[in-house]
Image (cartoon, rainbow, N blue to C red):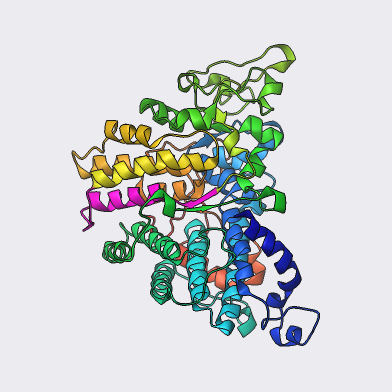
Amino acid sequence: MKKYITIFLTGILLAVSSCDGDFADINTDPNRAGGNVFDPNLILPTVSFNYGNMMTGYSGAILFQSMWVQLMASTSTGGANYYSNADKYLASGSTNSYIQSVWNDGFSAASRVYQMQALAEQKGFSNLVAVGEIWKVLTLSFVSDVYGDIPYSEALQAESGITQPKYDSQSELYMAMLSDLEGALTSINASGDQIKNDVLFRGDLTKWKKLGYSIMLRMAMRLVDVDPTTAKSYVQKAIAGGVFASPADEAVLVSDQANGYSNSSANALNVTDDVYEVRWSNKLIDYLKSNNDPRLSIIAEIPLAGLAANKGTAVGNNSPSAQIGMPNGYDLRGGATDITNAPNYPGPTGSGGDVAPIGNYSRPTAIYRDRDAPVFILTYAEIQFLLADAAARGYSVPSSASAYYAAGLQGAMTSIAKFGGGTVSASEASAYASANPLDTSNATASLKMINTQIWATTGIFANFVEAWNNWKRSGYPELTPVNYSGNFSSGQIPRRQLYPASESTTNPVGLANGISSMGGDTWINNVWWDVDN
């Protein structure tokens, strides 16, 4: 699949400028590839990468959501003070920069999709237009779930003179996005244009449709508390259209370090301070240990003893029994919140000047530092768990909550092999699912079990923003907020990111209306579908 990215690099560097300016002027220049000769399929690899880059690494996922929902933890000292944004909801010197990353990356990516679609329409590539629409909805729904109200109906229309688009309320834009997604999916024609340079599905339109309907299912399930009628309607449409049917269908994006398309989370976790500072939380490790989860030995290790070893990448001890998760909200400053005062503190490793105070806590294994590691955009496991959630709520779905939950567990176990590290065999996954059936004694018990598993699975796949979004939607797992002195969220787990400060100059009226509609611009304003659980 890496060859597609290489093809893109050789073609797009020569031609992409034709997408950014006046097509008529550029098309008269014989030394530049204009819209009449440029294949818009060449834009698809970078469109795919842009989304993967937005949902990973320092764009926000690791620096905010990974620790907001207590999947990871950090003492936030030394050179890695930026993790105080996540672990303690405490501003660092670059917090304002981190706040705007998803916004800037998301609208930049959506703009590139729009350019691809415009060229595709000129050439009659209706399937590529539809694929672009799927990607646009995926991208801007991500942005909206992070911030709330955003431009949508008037977005991406600068060439038409709309440079300060209105902010649509999330209730309006969700309906528009679901409608746009449905329209795109019904327009895909197996006899139409072929999708080329496709790093995700190799041009398989059947899989693109499954992705689109799986996105529809996830978006519909966002609405279960705020608009159950619409939620049920679109769940039915997604199932009828055909969601992921196996792990072979899921959207897992290849990375390609050699050609400049490395995994952004891995880039972050290779920084020396991050290697030392980023640990798995006790919430996650305790959960996996309590269930004898076979993924634990694949994802977690205790580093070799000493500070130098903790800052290095030598393979540590991955024995499940040895793993200890770090509690959130502690530091290394010698006061009441010093990690040495945490309950059940396991003590340091090393001696003398080579002491590692947090050395006995579990850190991510090398699979998370592999710059060629894939990006898990949307998985079969997540879709099966969402179907289980729908079944537990009494929605009319083809199978039972128990069956969907078991399928989700098996998918979660076997798909971890796509990281390229340890594996869980199909037989092991099946045995685990049989030994850990869904609690169906009542709906609350089922929903708690299903959504806690979504949290763990999306976290293990390094899809931290989705773990956070689903926690907002479901209320599971039940988390105790960190109330660290000086925090920016009144001691509550943040439920959104602030709008970028740059919007106050580039789109002041839109921003003002968006803030008014949201009821303020704070870390704890709820987005529309987020009904506190």
Report whether residue 151 is seen.
no
The magenta segment: 375-400
Q: Position of residue 122 (x, y in %)?
A: 58, 84
Residue furthest top in the image: 352
- At x 56%, y 21%, the residue is 317
The residue located at (50%, 78%) in the rendering is: 126
Residue drawn at (69%, 27%), measured in percent from left and top? 312
Instruction: Let me know if residue 148 is in the magenta part.
Output: no
In-image side of 335 versus 515 (left or right): right
Q: Position of residue 10 (x, y in %)?
A: 73, 64
Residue found at the very far left of the displayed protein: 441
In the shown orientation, is residue 123 left or right of residue 205? right
Q: Quadrant of residue 488?
A: top right
Residue toward you, 345 or 369: 369
428 vs 197, left or right, is left
**Residue 20 at x, y = what percent?**
70, 75
Q: Is residue 353 left or right of residue 382?
A: right
The one nearer the camera, 330 or 400, is 400
Q: Would you place residue 145 above or below residue 128 in this image?
A: above
Residue at 62 percent across and 38 percent down: it is: 369
Give the percent coordinates (x, y) of residue 179. Answer: 39, 73
